[in-house]
Image (cartoon, helix red, strand yellow):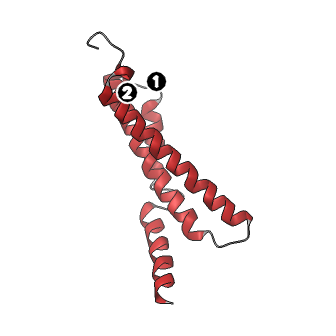
Amino acid sequence: QFGQKLAQMPVMQQQYAQAYTELHAAEVMIYNACRLKENGMSFVAEASMCKLYTSQVAERIASKSIEWLGGNGFTKDLMVEKFYRDCKVGSIYEGTSNIQLQTIAKIVNREYES
C-alpha cells in the first residue's frame, strides 16, 4: 500500500511489536509457573494468571490478525477466523476468565490477610 509493504509502515510495525511483546510476556509467565512447579513450590496463582493472560493475548492477537488481513481475515481460506474462534473459546472453556480472576483474588487476599 502506498508503494511499500505493510510491514514497513511504522503504524503496522508498532502493532506487530505490541503483539510480539505480549506473546513474549505470556511465554515468560508460563516458564515461571513451570519453574515453580518443578521446584515443588506453590504455583496455583501463577498458573491461573497464565491461563487468564494467555487467553486474553491470544484473542487480542487473533483479532488484530483479522484486522491486518482486512476482508480476507473473515474467510475460511486463511484459517485466521478459526484461530480467533478457538481463542475466544479459551476464555470460556478450561476455566473461564472469571474463574481465573476469582482464583487469583483469593490467593492475593490470603497473602495480605496473613
Q: Earlier in the sequence, mark 1 or mark 2?
A: 2
Front position in the image: 82 or 52 = 52
Disc number at residue 13?
none
Give percent across and percent down for residue 98.
41, 65
Q: Secondary structure at mark 1?
A: loop
Give percent across and percent down for residue 52.
47, 58
Q: Amino acid at mark 1?
A: Leu
When the figure is inspected, residue 106 is found, relative to residue 81, above or below; the finding is below
Residue 1 occupies quadrant: top left
* Image point (67%, 65%), residue name: 36
Disc number at residue 73?
2
Label 1 packing within 10 angstroms: few (<14), some (14-19), many (20+): few
Front position in the image: 41 or 106 = 41
In whole angstroms, how far apart are the C-alphas of marks 1 and 2?
A: 7 Å
Give percent across and percent down for residue 8.
37, 20
User: Residue pushed farthest right?
Assistant: 39
Count of all numbered marks drawn on residues in the image: 2
User: Residue pushed farthest top?
Assistant: 3
* Image point (34%, 28%), residue name: 12
User: Residue pushed farthest bottom?
Assistant: 114
Q: Which residue is mark 1?
A: 78
Residue 14 occupies quadrant: top left
Label 2 packing within 10 angstroms: few (<14), some (14-19), many (20+): many
Give percent across and percent down for residue 11.
30, 30
* Image point (62%, 61%), residue name: 33
* Image point (47%, 51%), residue name: 55
Q: Secondary structure at mark 2?
A: helix
Q: Amino acid at mark 2?
A: Gly
- Circle 1/circle 2 CB separation < 8 Å: yes
